[in-house]
Image: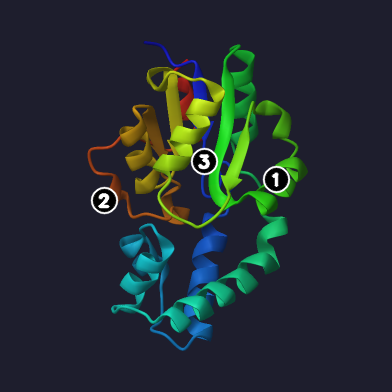
Amino acid sequence: MSIEHIVWDWNGTLFGDGPALIESTIAAFRAAGLPAVTRESYQRHHTQPIPLFYDRLAGRELSEDEQSALAGHFRTEYLKIRDDIPLTHDALVSLRRWQDSGRSQSLLSMYPHDELMPLVRKAGIADYFVAVDGLRGAYGRKAPHLRRQLDELGLDPSTVLLVGDSVDDAAAARECGTGFRLYHAGRDALHHRDHFAGMSIVDSLGEAVDSVL
């Protein structure tokens, strides 16, 4: 069955904030007095949910207070630079090409919804989507949120492609019955490429669109 709808991820996919996420995490661990994090260790240990990721980076189970402190330090560092982060280099042309094909697309992010919407509007891309959904409530796995969006839009999962940049995106797609392509941004990717072994990887967003046009 042909793909009629693309669900786009935000952080690290349409929004080119991979370097900012990595650098903000490095700074957060430094501010918390925890073991130093490098770009390489970030990519090697990256996983969801974030508290588990922080445990892996620290090499031990962190206390609730330590997790809270890290989250605060991260947010402080990330917000310093968030508003100057551009879209991924080929995001806009990829959105336009898919729209011009006469098919639909939506945005699904685990970034807080109330903070996501202003960023999407500022980027000038809100009108490309039939739905924009950020996280409402507690952070967790992406699959339930993907299923909810598919149901609300009345989409047949077999006609949907999820384009994201994380193992959690792949897991959500598999659980919900959609196709997927994982964008790997090279040096700025959040995951080491080995995490995507055996998965459908693309090196650009345009390549993801090409694969289903």
Q: Earlier in the sequence, mark 1 or mark 2?
A: 1
Q: Callout 1: few (<14), some (14-19), or many (20+) C-alpha neighbours within 10 Å?
A: some
Residue projecting furthest to the left: 198
> Who's the residue at 37% across and 34% down the image?
173
Answer yes or no: is residue 211 visible.
no
- 175 left or right of 80 in image: left
Query: Which label is found at residue 78?
Result: none
Circles 1 and 2, Cβ within 8 Å, touching? The answer is no
Q: Which residue is mark 3?
A: 9
Above or below, comparing residue 64 to residue 14 in the picture:
below
> Who's the residue at 37% across and 66% down the image?
53
Q: Earlier in the sequence, mark 2 or mark 3?
A: 3
Q: Quadrant of residue 200?
A: top left
Query: Which label is found at residue 117?
Result: 1
All told, the count of numbered labels is 3
- 67 left or right of 72 in image: left
Above or below, comparing residue 131 to residue 56 in the picture:
above
Q: Callout 2: few (<14), some (14-19), or many (20+) C-alpha neighbours within 10 Å?
A: few
Q: Quadrant of residue 98?
A: top right
Q: What kind of element bears circle 2?
A: helix
2 or 3: mark nearer the eye: 3
Image position, residue 105 (x, y; %): 57, 25
Image position, residue 65 (x, y; %): 47, 83
Q: Earlier in the sequence, mark 1 or mark 3?
A: 3
Circles 1 and 3, Cβ within 8 Å, touching? The answer is no
Task: Report, in whole angstroms, how far the alpha carbon at label 1 lies from the one at label 2.
Answer: 33 Å
Q: Which residue is mark 2?
A: 194
Image position, residue 76 (x, y; %): 64, 73
Task: Report, in whole angstroms, how far the alpha carbon at label 2 lies from the one at label 3.
Answer: 20 Å
